[in-house]
Image: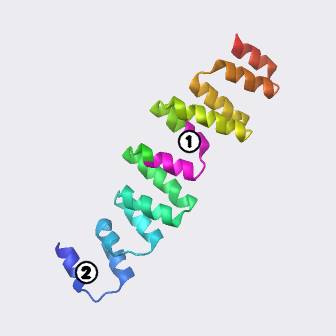
Amino acid sequence: GQVMKMIKNSKLCGQAIIAYLQEKGYPEVALHFVQDKKTRFKLALECGNLDVAMEAAVEVNEDECWNSLGIEALRHGNIPVVEMAYQRTKNFERLSFLYLMTGNKEKLAKMLKIAEMRKDPMSQFHNALYLGNVGERVKILEEVGQLALAYLTAA
């Protein structure tokens, strides 16, 4: 309350106020005065406001923002935001692992199809492994010419 009143009555200009608030440990207050989307994103992350950070990330739409948002959302345990960040950056490996950790077999199966469309045998193999799909692993190993491994996997 008192900090907000001081700022509204202050003659200081924008960046100085924001820097001061941030330095003094009030990024959530500084967030109310910021219009620049990147600065808003950074402040929102700093104070753990994932909703505001997500809004800013959508507007900025840069991989760097989405990566940072994904890391912070993971720290907070906010799986839907992590998922969206990984999708936006096309971070297929982390997305597959997220689905493995959350037990989402349907989306893992979709990741297997995406890996097939991308012609990425390593990603295909990982997703087949995560799904416990031995037949698919054997097929992938045969396709890449690893017949001995395919035979061992099938046994």
Q: Mostly what secondary structure, the magenta segment?
A: helix
* Residue located beneath label 1 in the image: 94
The picture quadrant where one finds residue 49 is bottom left
* Image quarter (top left, top right, bottom left or bottom right) of the N terminus: bottom left
Q: Which of disc 1 and disc 2 is earlier in sequence? A: 2
Q: Is residue 25 visible?
A: no
The picture quadrant where one finds residue 50 is bottom left
Quick one: label 1, few (<14), some, or many (20+) residues within 10 Å? some
Q: Residue at x 65, y 35 (%)?
A: 113
Whether 84 is among the magenta residues is yes
Range of the magenta residues? 81-96
| Amino acid type of the residue tagged 1 in the rendering | Arg
Vertical placement of residue 71 versus 101, above or below: below
Residue 14, label in figure: none
Label 2–label 1 contact, CB within 8 A: no
Farthest residue toward the top?
Answer: 155
Farthest residue toward the right?
Answer: 145
Residue 6 place in picture, x, y as percent: 21, 81
* Spatial CA span between label 2 and label 1: 42 Å
* Residue located beneath label 2 in the image: 7
| Amino acid type of the residue tagged 2 in the rendering | Ile
